[in-house]
Amino acid sequence: MTDDLDLTPRPGAGASNERRSFRNIAILGTLGVVLGFIMFQAVTGASVYYYNVDEAVDQQAELADRTFRLQGTVVTEPTIDASGAMLFNVAFNDQEVAVRHVGEEPTDLFELSIPVVAEGHFENGVFVSRQLLIKHSESYVADNPDRIDTEIESQLDAG
């Protein structure tokens, strides 16, 4: 029975399969390169390091004008200079540094003795910040019970 079955390839059939295989490899290769590029950008773009005030002051010469995040507690009342920049000091582990914030105005949560993270760089011994993140306490709901939806509150209590 196998004598009646012709298994020889038809002319040109192999070339079509080779082209399709090459196209698939090219598409997968391109997708791999694009995915690799996106991952590389995500990793390098997210490499803004955190330093506590004491660490940043100790490494100020090495940090030079590199952008990083500085973490500390506000220890002086903020003032506004002639250029509109906010000036205040932050401290951590008995080290203190002056901050000149030239970015967007922080929220009303910004005040003395509040922990902050400022993103920026050193400039002549002063930390120049363009972004300011403020850590808030969990006392918000207790201080403002009228600002939470009762349906959400019941879900929080149940969960």
Image (cartoon, rainbow, N blue to C red):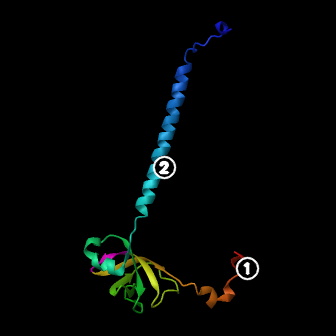
- Quadrant containing the C terminus is bottom right
- Numbered disc in front, either 2 or 1: 1
Q: At 55% across and 25% down in the image, what residue appears?
A: 17
Query: Dividing the picture into quarters, in which one does residue 157 lie?
Result: bottom right
Report x, y in % for residue 128.
35, 78
Q: What stretch is highlighted in magenta?
A: 120-124
Q: Say few, some or many: other residues with alpha carbon within 10 Å of mark 2 (under 14 / 14 to 19 / 20 or more).
A: few
- The total of numbered circles placed on residues is 2
Return the residue at label 2. 35
Q: At 42% across and 93% down in the image, what residue appears?
A: 77
Q: Do the residues labelled 2 and 1 touch (CB within 8 Å)?
A: no
Which residue type carries mark 2? Leu
Indicate left or right for 15 with 53 as reference: right
Gap in angstroms between the C-alphas marked 2 and 1: 43 Å
Q: At 44% across and 51% down in the image, what residue appears?
A: 37
Which residue type carries mark 1? Ser
Return the residue at label 1. 154
Q: Is residue 121 magenta?
A: yes
Q: Which of marks 2 and 1 is nearer the N terminus?
A: 2
What type of secondary structure mainly makes up the magenta span? strand
Indicate left or right for 58 with 12 as reference: left
Q: Say few, some or many: other residues with alpha carbon within 10 Å of mark 1 (under 14 / 14 to 19 / 20 or more).
A: few
Report x, y in % for residue 101.
40, 81
Q: Which mark is residue 17?
A: none
Report x, y in % for residue 126.
31, 82
Answer above or below: position of 63 versus 97. Answer: above
- Quadrant containing the N terminus is top right
What element does badge 1 sit on?
Answer: helix
